[in-house]
Structures are given as C-alpha cells and as structure tokens.
Image: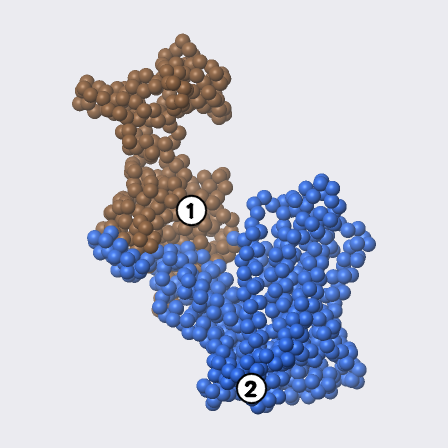
Chain colours: A brown, B blue
C-alpha cells in the first residue's frame, strides 16, 4: 500500500504550521520525516492519520482520496510517543483492540472471527517478542515493552500505513537502539508501509529507505539516506544530517575554490566543465572527506585549534591560515594515532571531489 | 473574530475544506460540542440557583425592612461573634497546623506514614460529632472556648497537610547558609525555611476559616451565637422569614469573600514559590526524649480527635446502663439517610459529568466561567442553600416543598464541587493520545468515548460519587430545613436527641455516623498509598 500526500497546508487557529508539504511512501517503504521541534512534523503525521483537518491539500492512501475520511475509516496505524497504551486493558486486550468492533456490534461477531482475532494477537506478540506477556497490564511493562505493544497494536488490523511519532525518543540511549532495531525488524517482517517522525538524524539515516527533511513547515529535501548525506540539496540539510564545514567558495569550470584551495566539484555535469563564468556556492566538507598532513604535506596551510579524541579516531578542528583569522573552521577526522596539538601547523585538503550547494 | 478565522480558512483552501468528520485539531483548541456546553451551562445555572434565589428574595422584600434588619444590633453582635470565632479558630489552626507540619516534615518519627494519615483523618469527622463528644463528657459545656477547641481540632488538617507538603518540598539550601552565617538550628529553620511554607499554611488557614464560618452543628450544639445558628433560629422562630434571608445573605457574602481570598492567595503564593534549585535535607533526629515528646504531642491530638468521640459515646452508653435503642427508628433513619445520600451522589455525578468533561478537555473563558459557577457550592454554607431552597420551593414549585427531591438537589448543589473535582481529574488522566489511537484502530468518536475514556475514568468518577454520598449522609443544616415531614436522617436524629439532652439515646446514631466517616478516610488512605505505585507504573 502506498501513501501520497500532496500540498498539505495546515495549522492552528489560522496560523499555518505546514506550507504545502508533499510526502510519498511506496509499498513496504519506511520513510522518515526528520525535523527539529516546531518544524511541523507531528502536525503532518496527524494530518495523515486524520486527526487534524488540513486547510488545503490531499492525502491518498492506496490510491484512494481519504482527505475527508474520519480516522477510524482510514486504516492507519498510530504509534504515539510514549505508547499511550490503554491502561484498563492487558497486553492482549491492547493488541486486539482494533480487531473486534465495540459495543453491541461485538455480540454479533461469530466464533471464527473471534478465534481469528486471538490468533492474530498471538502472531503479533510473537512478532514483537512478547509471547507469554499477553496478560500483563501496561503498568507492569518496561518502557521498551510498552513501545513494542503499541507497535503490535498498530500493526494488528493490517493498516495501509503505520505512523510512528518519535516512539523511541523517551527511551535511554542503549535501550533505544535495541527497541528501534526490533521495531524496524517487526515493521519489515510485516511488510508495512511506515512513516517515522524523528528529530534524531542517526535514527533517520540508519533505519529508513528515504528521509524527508522538514524545516519550518516546508520540505527541504527528500532522498535516500546515502544521497541525503553525500549530496544535500541545501546548506541547512547538509548541517542537519551530519557534521560538516560549510565553506563559501566560487565555482567555475567544474572546480570550486575555497579557503582550502581548489577542488573538483562532485557530480558536476560534463557540460558545465570548461564553461566560463563563476558561481557563488557553499562547499560541504564532511570531516571524513578531509585529510590532514604536516606542514610539508599537500593542501592549504592551517593551524590546529582543538583536538578531540573519540576512541577510534581523532577529530581535529583547524583554521585555514589563508583566512584572515575569523573565517570558518574545518573539522578533520583522522586516525587515532594522529599526534596533533592545538597550535600545530598543518596542511588540509579535500580527498576527492567536493559537493557544493547554492549559496543563499 | 470567528468570522475572520473562517474567511482566512477559506482563503488558504482552494480545494475546499474537507468533510467535518476529521477533527479540526488538538482538543484544547477545538470548540466544545454544543450539547456538552449546553448541558454544562444548565448545570452551572442549577448550581447558582440557591444564591440567585436568595438575592431575589432579599431584593423583593421591603427595602426599609432589609436596611433595618441589616443595621440592627443583632447583626453587629453576630458579626462580632462570628469574627471572634473565626479569628480564634484560624489562629489556633495556624499554630497547631504549623507545629504538626514541622514535626511531620522535618523530624524523624517512628512509622512516618502513620502520622501523615493520622494528621489527615480529622477531616472525615464532622465537627458536630466532636461537639457532641464534648457535651457527652461535660453536658454544661457551652460558649466560645469549647467551640474553638472543637473547631481547631476539626480544621487543623486544612493547614497541616499543605504546610507539611510545602515544607517537604522547600529548599533547605538557604537554611544551611543561615547556619553558616551564625544562626542556631531552630533560629535558622524559623527565619528561613518556615517562611517558605507560610503561604501554603495561610491558604489552608483561609479554608479553615471558611469551614468555621459555614459550620452549623458545632456552634448550635455548644450554644454559640454565630451567623449559621442565627439563620436557623430566625427560620424556625418567626413567621416572617425576611430576617433569616437577610442574615443568610450576609453570611453568603462573607463566605464567598473567603473563597475569593483563598483563590487569590493560592494563585499568587504558589506562583511566587517556583524556585529552580532545590536541596532537601533529611529529617532531623531528636534523640529519645525529643522523639517521645513529639510522638506524645501528635498522638494525643490524634487521640482526642479520633478516639474521643467513640470513647465518649461508649462511656455514655455504659453510664446509661446499657443500650436502650429504638432500633426501628434508627433503622428507618439509616434507610432514609442512605436513600437521600445515594440520590444526591447520583445527581451530583450526573451534574458533574458534562462540566467535568468540558473542563478537562477544553479551555476557554466560557468554560472557566461555567466551571467556577459550578463550584459555588463550595462557598455556600448548608444553611444558606437550605433556606434559599425553602424559599424557592415555596414560591416556584410548591408541590415539591418539603419533599425528597428538593433535599437531594440541595445536597447535589452543596457537594457538586467534590464530584466535579473527581470527574475532571479522572477524565484528565485519560491521555488524549489513547483516544486518538482508538480512532485510528477503527472506533468512532462515540465508541472511543465509551470503550476508552469512560472505561478508564469511571473509577475516579465513582470515588467522587462515594465521597458526595458520605458527605451528604453527615449533612445537618440543609437537612433540618428541607427534609420531608416525619423523615429523619442519622444526623437530624442525633441533633433532635442531643437538643433534648438525651445523650445516651443519641449515641447509636452518632456511632453510625462515625462509622460512615471512616469510608472517605479509607479512600483517602488508599489514595495516599496508591499514588506512588501509579507513578512507578507509568
């Protein structure tokens, strides 16, 4: 099942939070919406779930326009931040909540449907690794277990799309990675289309098929994690998805000139090479794409300002000398055996072609 | 304002707004459903009815006569009496409450949990039972001094509990600083830490004053001429009830002023108390002699308040040479008490539901006004509500005068705040996210309401109903005025026999009432022990 969101404008009391957002998720795809708090990502999720009425735009689920359809008829699964389990029901009751109707209609459910529901609950508890805890009450579960029950509950009625609203953010760091791994494995095993809301770039890059970066209610870029990291569309995205030095420079003839000297532009179309005229750009220099050498080595001269030992590597902060002293610094990731000290003279160059984004 | 927003909506939505089945947004910003708002307004109007009708009655009366009644000496005497009483009780409660709070919060006592419960329990004992116990021991006790003792014992928890909580939460860093600056331990505590708890204690003192001013049973039993007793006397003693109405009006104004003062105080003082860095010191060890002294003090206050009444009652029964109980009458009284209070609980919960849900889920000025109006019963003494409903039923619905429905309605208005508070917090505790998940799992708004919200909230709502029921069982002044002819409740039976001086005969009803008082106490204790478990669970 696929999700298509087109031109969503939504807000509170006439103040728009989303200004025309598009989002797409193909069948079985896991798409992350990455954004800082206040970027409107939760509002987007609520619009998709049918919990918030958009002022404009359309939501299509499995090819059907569901913009005006009530949430209970959309077949979406929702995993809220803290799980929001039904505290009056045990684990099995929570997971089976969406499988049988409520009230009088429940009496008309035949035995086959009941045992089918029971079987489905058992299946899902197995999927999330909670077999044997079916009759626990929510308050008897750990934080990670509660997230897994919430996921199983959302998956049980086989929704067209599962929406996860920062479900792992309130967990401790170690537990978070484990629960996240289990949850993503369960989502993949169920073959569900999923939208994950997150403000954690590692989370977005590590688990998703594609990442949509949201800023101030507008989409900055939607791309696969590798492309997003290697070829961000804007300086903001570049800084948001990873550590990067953003050096202003001039692009001309397929090369860019910055404080670190001249380097080839990555992926520059052959047609642009050798063409006249320069363009103001920003070069995106990731720490692992830079090399540092002694004063006699290759590259632009620089002075080491700060050294961070990371265990498996050393992160050196250096300021290119050619600069007047108040320009941007660059960070270089180098081997753990690098013996750099603040004040050392060194030389820095980019290893391979450099990615550039337009200067704004 | 509303029109403009709609126009703005239309301007940004060229595709036209989607069908209204999709909720407009998160709940606090939604406009409440019309039915819910309408029902809540009706409830608020009902809650305001006694006060409004009293005003109507006074305005309708001959203005000269009203002025004459207001200006006569008796009003002054009553005002002085009530003022003196309130001042003495408030002062006593403040001192005793702060002392108790200090011991509870800052001193290491054996079995600390027990002392907190014992400090809270007197809230459940009606003051007239304490007064009755005093009379049972000394039949000639009357006047200010025994009354102040009784009311201080009954009202101290209003000060103790918030003050102890504030002391527990207080920052003891400044106290350490004061010690290093040359103050002794007691001096540092009194000069630095105690002031942090004073706002909470003063807000509690205002509550104690409100209780004292509205209390009818204890002043009447101990023959002290306060406003409440005067209202009741004027109602029973004269044909022209304008005097009663005017006195009740003055009383209502005074109590509402106290409620207002309490609200303002709470808002201002709690806001001022927000500090960031908080250090907490462990409780102080007093040594064996000091601990024994503290335990004796706390224990004797608790014993007088909690064990005094039953001991005095049993003593009375033994002195009378066994029980000479009119079982039939007692059973009849118990039955009507249960029926009336049960009806009151049902009505109060029904009235509290729309307002409680509205207040828990929606925020706006209208909602706040509706909620505050529904809380009016908190500030109105039972005599005032009783008298006003006598007037109302005589004029507007004469066929209901002195029937059970009017009395049940009076109870419901008086105790609606209890049901309302319970309902609101119960509904607030159901997370909105759980409701939203239920919607995405295929349940409609109404199905979600019944299978998620109601299922999770009903225990709290039911506890509120039980609290109303138990409180209504102990209610005296409104019951005296409004009860159907020939119907006795336990409280009125106790009252009738005590006023005749037959304390032995009154003892069984008093014991029954005391047992009833244990129910909210048990609830209170259970809630107190359960809360840490709840937070651990979530």
Q: Around disc 2, counting alpha carbons within 10 Å, would you say few (fewer than 14), some (14 to 19), or many (20 or more)?
A: some
Q: Nearer the viewer, residue A60 or B199?
A: B199
Q: Nearer the viewer, mark 2 or mark 1?
A: 2
User: Which structural element holds mark 2?
Assistant: loop
Query: Residue beneath label 2, please?
Result: B241
Could you tell me how far apart the alpha carbons at marks 2 and 1 are, in whole angstroms? 67 Å
Whether residue B229 is visible: no
Task: Answer left or right for B494 relative to A48.
Answer: right
Task: Name the chain letter of the residue that bears numbered label 1.
Answer: A
What residue is rendered at 67% in x and 48% in y? B192
- Percent from the top left, x then y, of residue A214? 33, 41
Task: Name the chain letter of the residue that bears numbered label 2.
Answer: B
Q: Residue furthest top?
A: A296
Query: Residue beneath label 1, please?
Result: A167
- Percent from the top left, x then y, of residue B228? 62, 78
- Percent from the top left, x then y, of residue B528? 61, 60
Residue B196 vertical position relative to residue B316 in the rendered view, above or below: above
Mark 2 on the same chain as mark 1: no
Residue A120 vertical position relative to residue B33 in the rendered view, above or below: above
Whether residue A171 is visible: yes
Toward which corner of the image does residue A300 lie, by quadrant? Answer: top left
What residue is rendered at 42% in x and 20% in y? A318
What residue is rendered at 29% in x and 57% in y? B5
- Percent from the top left, x then y, of residue B35? 36, 70
Residue A33 vertical position relative to residue A96 in the rendered view, above or below: above
Q: Quadrant of the N terminus of chain B?
A: bottom left
């Amino acid at each position: 099942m696929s999700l298509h969101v087109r031109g969503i404008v939504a807000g509170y009391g006439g103040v728009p939070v989303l200004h025309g957002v598009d989002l797409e998720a193909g069948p079985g795809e896991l798409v992350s919406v990455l954004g800082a708090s206040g970027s409107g990502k939760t509002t987007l999720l609520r619009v998709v779930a049918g919990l918030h009425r958009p002022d404009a735009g359309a939501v299509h689920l499995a090819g059907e326009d569901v913009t005006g359809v009530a949430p209970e008829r959309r077949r979406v699964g929702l995993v809220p931040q803290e799980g929001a389990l039904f505290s009056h029901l045990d684990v099995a009751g929570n997971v089976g909540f969406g499988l049988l109707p409520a009230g009088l209609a429940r009496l008309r459910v035949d035995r086959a449907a009941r045992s089918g529901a029971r079987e489905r609950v058992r299946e899902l508890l197995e999927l999330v690794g909670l077999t044997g805890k079916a009759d626990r009450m929510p308050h008897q579960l750990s934080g990670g277990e509660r997230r897994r029950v919430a996921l199983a509950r959302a998956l049980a009625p086989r929704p067209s799309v599962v929406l996860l609203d920062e479900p792992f953010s309130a967990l401790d760091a170690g537990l978070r990675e484990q629960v996240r791994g289990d949850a993503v494995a369960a989502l993949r095993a169920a073959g569900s289309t999923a939208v994950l809301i997150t403000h954690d770039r590692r989370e977005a890059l590590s688990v998703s098929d594609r990442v949509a970066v949201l800023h101030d209610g507008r989409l900055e870029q939607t791309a696969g994690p590798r492309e997003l990291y290697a070829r961000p569309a804007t300086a903001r995205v570049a800084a948001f998805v990873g550590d990067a030095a953003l050096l202003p420079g001039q692009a001309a003839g397929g090369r860019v000139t910055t404080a670190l000297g001249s380097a080839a532009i990555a992926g520059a179309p052959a047609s642009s090479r050798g063409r006249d005229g320069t363009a103001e750009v920003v070069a995106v220099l990731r720490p692992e794409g830079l090399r540092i050498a002694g004063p006699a080595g290759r590259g632009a001269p620089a002075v080491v300002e700060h050294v961070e030992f990371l265990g498996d590597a050393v992160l050196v902060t250096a300021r290119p000398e050619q600069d007047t002293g108040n320009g941007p610094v660059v960070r270089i990731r180098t081997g753990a055996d690098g013996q750099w000290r603040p004040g050392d003279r060194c030389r820095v160059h980019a290893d391979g072609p450099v990615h550039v984004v337009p200067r704004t | 304002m509303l029109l403009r927003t709609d126009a703005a909506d239309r301007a940004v939505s060229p595709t036209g707004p989607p069908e209204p089945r999709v909720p407009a947004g998160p709940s606090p910003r939604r406009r409440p459903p019309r039915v819910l708002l309408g029902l809540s307004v009706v409830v608020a109007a009902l809650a305001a009815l006694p006060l409004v009708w009293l005003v109507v009655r006074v305005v309708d009366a001959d203005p000269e006569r009203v002025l004459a009644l207001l200006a006569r000496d008796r009003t002054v005497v009553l005002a002085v009496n009530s003022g003196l009483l309130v001042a003495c009780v408030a002062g006593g409660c403040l001192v005793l409450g702060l002392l108790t709070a200090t011991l509870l919060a800052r001193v290491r006592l054996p079995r600390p949990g027990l002392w907190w419960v014992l400090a809270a329990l007197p809230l459940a004992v009606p003051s007239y039972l304490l007064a009755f116990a005093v009379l049972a021991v000394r039949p000639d006790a009357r006047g200010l001094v025994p009354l102040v003792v009784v009311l201080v014992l009954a009202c101290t928890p209003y000060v103790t509990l918030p003050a102890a909580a504030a002391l527990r939460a207080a920052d003891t860093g400044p106290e350490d600083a004061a010690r290093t600056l040359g103050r002794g331990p007691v001096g540092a505590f009194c000069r630095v830490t105690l002031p942090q708890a004073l706002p909470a204690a003063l807000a509690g003192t205002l509550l104690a004053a409100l209780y004292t001013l509205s209390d009818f049973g204890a002043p009447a039993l101990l023959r002290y001429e306060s406003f409440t007793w005067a209202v009741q006397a004027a109602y029973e003693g004269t044909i022209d009830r304008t005097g009663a109405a005017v006195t009740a009006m003055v009383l209502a104004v005074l109590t509402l002023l106290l409620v207002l003062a309490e609200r303002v105080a709470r808002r201002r003082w709690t806001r001022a108390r927000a500090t960031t860095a908080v250090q907490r010191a462990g409780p102080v060890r007093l040594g064996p002699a000091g601990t024994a002294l503290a335990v004796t003090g706390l224990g004797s206050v608790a014993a007088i308040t909690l064990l005094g009444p039953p001991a005095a009652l049993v003593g009375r029964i033994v002195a009378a040479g066994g029980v000479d109980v009119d079982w039939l009458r007692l059973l009849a009284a118990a039955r009507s008490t249960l029926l009336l209070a049960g009806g009151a609980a049902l009505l109060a919960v029904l009235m509290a539901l729309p307002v409680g849900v509205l207040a828990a889920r929606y925020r706006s000025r209208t909602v706040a006004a509706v909620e505050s109006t529904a809380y009016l019963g908190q500030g109105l003494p039972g005599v005032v509500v009783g008298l006003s409903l006598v007037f109302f039923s005589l004029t507007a619905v004469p066929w209901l005068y002195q029937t059970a429905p009017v009395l049940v309605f009076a109870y419901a208005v008086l105790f609606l705040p209890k049901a309302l508070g319970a309902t609101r917090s119960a509904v607030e505790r159901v997370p909105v996210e759980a409701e939203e998940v239920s919607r995405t799992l295929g349940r409609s708004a109404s199905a979600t309401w019944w299978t998620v919200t109601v299922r999770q909230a009903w225990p709290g709502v039911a506890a509120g109903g039980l609290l109303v029921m138990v409180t209504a069982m102990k209610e005296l002044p409104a019951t005296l005025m409004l009860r159907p002819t020939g119907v006795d409740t336990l409280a009125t039976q106790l009252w009738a026999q005590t006023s005749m001086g037959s304390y032995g005969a009154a003892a069984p009803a008093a014991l029954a009432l005391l047992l009833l008082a244990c129910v909210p106490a048990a609830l209170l204790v259970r809630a107190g022990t359960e809360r840490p478990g709840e937070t651990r669970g979530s």
